[in-house]
Image (cartoon, rainbow, N blue to C red):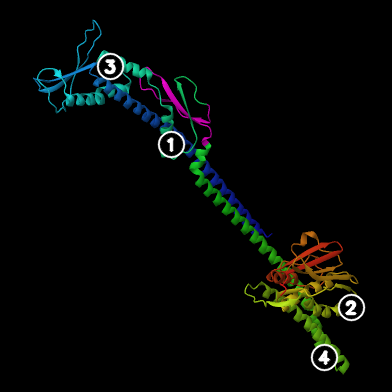
Amino acid sequence: MTRQIKLLVLLMAACTLALAGLQAYWNYQAYRTATRTFRRDANEALAEAASQEMQLRREALLSRYRTWLADTSEIILRGYVEPVYNSPRFFVADKHPFPKEKRAPYEIGFTDFTGHLGPRPARLDAVARAFFIQRFTVGAVAADVRTGLTYFYTKSLGDKLIAAYAADTVHRRRLAVLYAQALRRREVAAPFRLRFDSLGAPGPRAAFATAPVRVDFAKKMAGRVRAGFADPNRAYLGRIKWVLLGSVGLIGIVVCCFAYTTRALLSQERLAALKDDFVNNMTHELKTPVATIGVAAEALEQFALGPAATAEYLGIIRQQAARLGALADKILQSVVAEQAGLALARLPLDLGALLAPVLREAQPRLVQAGSRLAYAAPAGPVPLVGDAVHLTNVLATLLDNALKYGQPGSEIALWCGAENSQAVLRITNEGPGIPAQYQARVFEKFFRVPTGNRHDVPGSGLGLHYARALVQRHGGILALHSQAGCTTFTIRLPLAPVP
């Protein structure tokens, strides 16, 4: 790895870590804010629900108080118009006062009364009675109930109110419903449990409990309620889940971009090294034929050679020119294989028939290398659909590699046939094999198994890359299995349907 790439990768890693740290800090702050907001909302919602529930009980008590006032067998209601100020005045008293009780009737005036009253105290008619009961309970009595006081407007009314205070209890189910509604209005979704106790009693055992809220409106009562949440984290995370998901997604994208960029940089560096190796290999491969052609041409030009010698030198020139042409063809084939728009012929073919001319052309090289070919021909046609020219080149490339990298005088095994609805070709050569760490890379463009500065076997690093690309374009796979003393390449292509 070059110094510039190392520096760039380190800077990118530092930026990624810094961004992840900032996101983590921001999420922590968001979590703390959500926690504080939840605690505030839980307490405010409980206070609101308790206030609503107590108000409903107050209204029920006031409704009973109106019933007591309307009971003519117990309460006497009178009224008259005060002559000096011409203002209506009302009296309320027990119809059956306790013996020896000396109590003046309770008197109160309402300036907004529009009914009829006489100049002397008299029993109220239906209109005046209804006005007094409603106006008196929503005014003076309601103020007493709100503060939990008991005012003896009459002894019987005071006694009944004290008894009502003593019998008053919290409607627990209704309070739970009101609290759940108050929480929903604040967008809090978490299970809770209410606990009712007296002042000084311990609160509910829970991960979080609200402050106690009084639920008895009589001053002499000391009831209170708390709300406990067993798992408040669900509520915290529920409020910031989209923030967390967005943050995690952003960090994931940044990490993926960093990994992809680093991989691309390393791939480009590796590709540059492979290209350098390719240039070195091709320079070596080109020097020999070019030098041979130059020497032969110079001999023809400077020496008066006979017909036999001239023919020999011309043969050398043709042979080396063919070698140069073969190298150029390999480069062009690799370029063509990478073109996405390459049009392949889709014609019915027979794998055995494609292999026959390749074997014929390889015979001279087999004889020259002293190698033997053990060919297991298919029992019948092996039909497939593809491009004959490119598939022939693939077969020739694999056989050429088996010859070049096989042990001199060894055997090359070739098998062709059909397996599991696939056309299969296996070619195995005896030799040193391909080290395990390079087996996945032999199909890369320009890659050759490192041999130092030696060039014992000519090659460009393009053949297997071209072969795999063409096999994949035909919907097949090209696999490698190599170990010490043996290397096998296997082609698998889809079988054509038999008509």
Name the residue: 49% across, 24% down.
203
**Amino acid type at image mark 1:** Leu
Nearer the camera: disc 1 or disc 4 = 1
- Highlighted range, magenta: 205-232
**Amino acid type at image mark 3:** Leu
Q: If the image is split into quadrants, where does the N terminus sit?
A: bottom right
Callouts 2 and 4 close, C-beta under 8 Å: no
Between 137 and 210, the one lying in front of the other is 137
Mark 1 or mark 2, which is nearer the start of the sequence?
Answer: 1
Q: Which residue is mark 3?
A: 157
Q: Which secondary structure lies at badge 2?
A: helix
Q: Is residue 200 on the magenta stretch?
A: no
**Amino acid type at image mark 4:** Leu
The label number, if any, that marks residue 205 in the structure image: none
Residue 218 location in percent, x, y? 35, 20
Q: In which quarter of the view is residue 79 placed?
A: top left
**Image vertical order of residue 203 relative to residue 284, above or below:** above
Q: Furthest-front residue in view?
A: 73
Q: CA distance from mark 1 to mark 4?
A: 103 Å
Mark 3, Cα crowd under 10 Å, few <14 / some 14-19 / many 20+, is many
Can the viewer see residue 158? yes
Q: Which residue is mark 4?
A: 300
Name the residue: 66% across, 58% down.
3
Between 473 and 17, the one lying in front of the other is 473
Between 98 and 178, the one lying in front of the other is 98
Residue 9 location in percent, x, y? 63, 56
Q: In which quarter of the view is residue 84 placed?
A: top left
Q: CA distance from mark 3 to mark 2?
A: 129 Å
Q: Which residue is mark 1?
A: 183
Residue 431 location in percent, x, y? 86, 66
Mark 4 or mark 2, which is nearer the start of the sequence?
Answer: 4
Q: CA distance from mark 2 to mark 4?
A: 31 Å
